[in-house]
Amino acid sequence: MSAVRDDMLGASVTEFLDGLAARTPTPGGGSVAALAGALFCAMARMVVAYSKSDAGRVSVFADRLEKADKMLRTLIAEDIAAYEALSAASREAKKDPAAADRKQQALIAASLVPMEMAATATTALATMDEFKSMAGRHLLSDLGVAAVIGRACVQAAAYSVRVNAIAMAEADHARQMMAETERLIARATELCTSVEAFVAQALK
């Protein structure tokens, strides 16, 4: 097993990229979505760290983004674990029809992880949007970059939800998951657009 899957959070950038490029199922799209979210939060934290505004308010924003950052880093490995569990359950269901329920449970679990990514990134984008007017002018480009990557995390995570939802036996459950995912995409897009508009105006 590769170092990437043994310890995702301890893997180097090179190890992660090599593991991603290899002909192995993990890491895959879900892990990339979570990594994008972690990159977004880390960059947003840097922008906040340089703020010279009210220290008390800045501390609140910094704490929110740090929590989101830690969550998204953890979700990189959790996505791999969920996918591998789903793969095992799918193989078992092919051999034994009685294992179909276990596969359905694994599908739900594999969907909840990217949904958590999307929800966490959307909340962090809301923090960025609230903070944007406090950002230093020399960090506005970083603020814009962070917002774009944050929205990309949400959009990318949605693909992992969709691919699992279409295989779910409970159509109502799948529809509920997709409805919530679409809501998160819309909200993330709204927040990203707000930050980008602010940056564009400030850099004129």
Image (tube, rainbow, N blue to C red):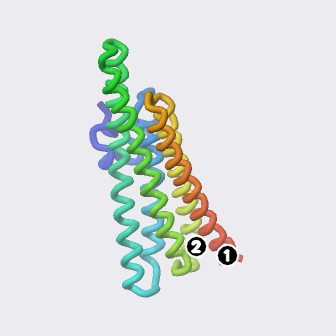
Tell me the residue at 31%/27% (across/down): 102
Disc number placed over residue 203 in the picture, else none: 1
Category of crowding for the residue at label 1, using alpha-carbon neighbours closer than 10 angstroms: few (below 14), some (14–19), many (at least 20):
few
Query: Could you tell which of marks 2 and 1 lies nearer the N-terminus?
Result: 2
In percent of width and height, residue 82 lies at 34, 36
Category of crowding for the residue at label 2, using alpha-carbon neighbours closer than 10 angstroms: few (below 14), some (14–19), many (at least 20):
many
Disc number placed over residue 140 in the picture, else none: 2
Q: CA distance from mark 2 to mark 1?
A: 8 Å
Q: Quadrant of residue 81?
A: top left
Q: Quadrant of the C terminus?
A: bottom right
Query: Please, what secondary structure does the residue beneath circle 1 have?
Result: loop
59 or 176, which is in the foreground?
A: 176
Instruction: Name the amino acid type tagged 1.
Output: Leu
Tell me the residue at 44%/70% (across/down): 46
Q: In the visual, does 36 lie left or right of 95?
A: right
179 or 103, which is in the foreground?
A: 179
User: Marks 2 and 1: CB-CB under 8 Å?
Assistant: yes
